[in-house]
Amino acid sequence: MRRADFHYDLPGELIAQAPLGDRAASRLLVVDGEAGTWRDSGFRDLPSLLQPGDLLVLNDTRVIPARVFGRKESGGRVELLVERLVGERGVIGQLRVSKTPAPGSRLLFEGSATALVTGRAGREGDLFELAFDRPVLAWLEAVGNMPLPPYIVRPADDLDRARYQTVFGRTPGAVAAPTAGLHFDEGLLAALAECGVETATVTLHVGAGTFQPVRTEDPRAHRLHAERVTVDAAAVAAVAAARARGGRVVAVGTTVVRSLEAAAAGGRLAPLAGETELFILPGYRFRVVDALVTNFHLPESSLLMLVCAFAGQDTVLGAYRHAVAARYRFFSYGDAMFLSPARGAREAAT
């Protein structure tokens, strides 16, 4: 397995730079992993792809305004991107500075906030631990900027405060949106409920590491940043009920896939509250997820590798080439896919 095996060519003009006026107006590429085929559709047609008794699992994380600006005491500019919150006043995050601050350094931020650099964090020491002089979440909500992905080459604006956020986000903590969920509006959720589709929620706080490229030639040597995840007893019971009535478990986004599969790592789905570094590659056998709604992902990315594991590498990359030729919109504010699994991708249901 090589990283280059997951490459595709993408013209830059297909990277969506802003959301559509209507959340559910996106296109939807329907991919049949077993047949190796795909067809064009629209996101509002999702109810026709689901069946009464299916369970739609959503990630209820809420994106926090995680990008803030400040300076060192010496005057140098500082940009902080919060990776995750640690308690009420602690942060682990990425710092952009001209010179790496030493432990014990003080940083001065917008809104008169002060942070003490207490150490390094991350698997490779690429993150910083900061201790703030005030509760961080309320401060970020007051002065922070929405942390748009690096491929959106414009500053975040007021529209992003609403649109880089799902309508069902309830639990603050993510620094990147679970983008498959951005296509749902209240009307579409109501239409799905009327069709007999049930819903459940899990929480995975997406970290900035989701945009970290796979740098190793052999993807199996790559490690993901840890992300906080909660799969509660209600979600486990909802999956069991769907199985009992013959319904499918439909994950809305790769974050939901990783949440459910991490919670089933012991062989059966069970409640989970902690962190996950689960990296899903081709050859993985899915224990919980029967279908997947997801956006298009970057070439050679860990998320594209997950989708290839689910619906088949040749099928997925062929579908991506079709999407490029058909001028789909890509990445966070782009269009979506609905995928069923390739033959052999699923284990027996749990």
Image (tube, grey):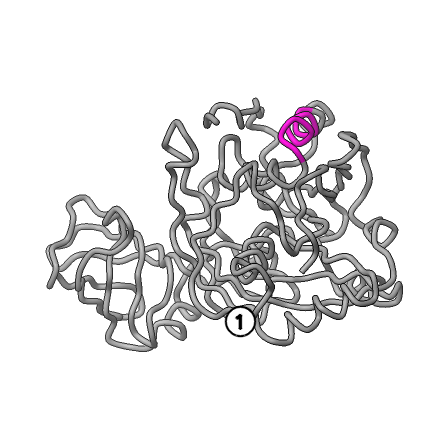
In depth, the one of 119 and 158 nearer the eye is 119
Residue drawn where x is 40% and y is 47% of the image:
224
In depth, the one of 264 and 182 nearer the eye is 264
192 to 24, vertically: above or below: below
> What range of the chain is rendered magenta?
312-321
What is the chief secondary structure element of the magenta stretch?
Answer: helix
Q: Residues within 10 Å of mark 1 (few under 14, many from 20)?
A: some
Q: Is residue 179 left or right of residue 315?
A: left
Residue drawn where x is 69% and y is 33% of the image:
328
x and y percentages locating residue 126 in the rendered image: 26, 48
Q: Could you tell me which quadrant the C terminus lies in?
A: bottom right
120 to 214, vertically: above or below: below
Q: Secondary structure at mark 1?
A: strand
Magenta stretch containing residue 319, yes or no?
yes
Residue drawn where x is 25% and y is 46% of the image:
124
Residue drawn where x is 68% and y is 68% of the image:
200
Q: Is residue 342 left or right of residue 118?
A: right
In depth, the one of 240 and 191 nearer the eye is 240
Total number of numbered discs in the rendering: 1
- Can you tell which quarter of the image residue 207 is in? bottom left
Q: Is residue 121 left or right of residue 22?
A: left
255 to 239, vertically: above or below: above
Q: Amino acid at mark 1?
A: Thr
Magenta stretch containing residue 61, yes or no?
no
Q: Is residue 77 left or right of residue 52?
A: left
x and y percentages locating residue 226 in the rendered image: 39, 56
x and y percentages locating residue 172 in the rendered image: 49, 69
9 to 201, vertically: above or below: above
Q: What residue is pinned by disc 1?
A: 171
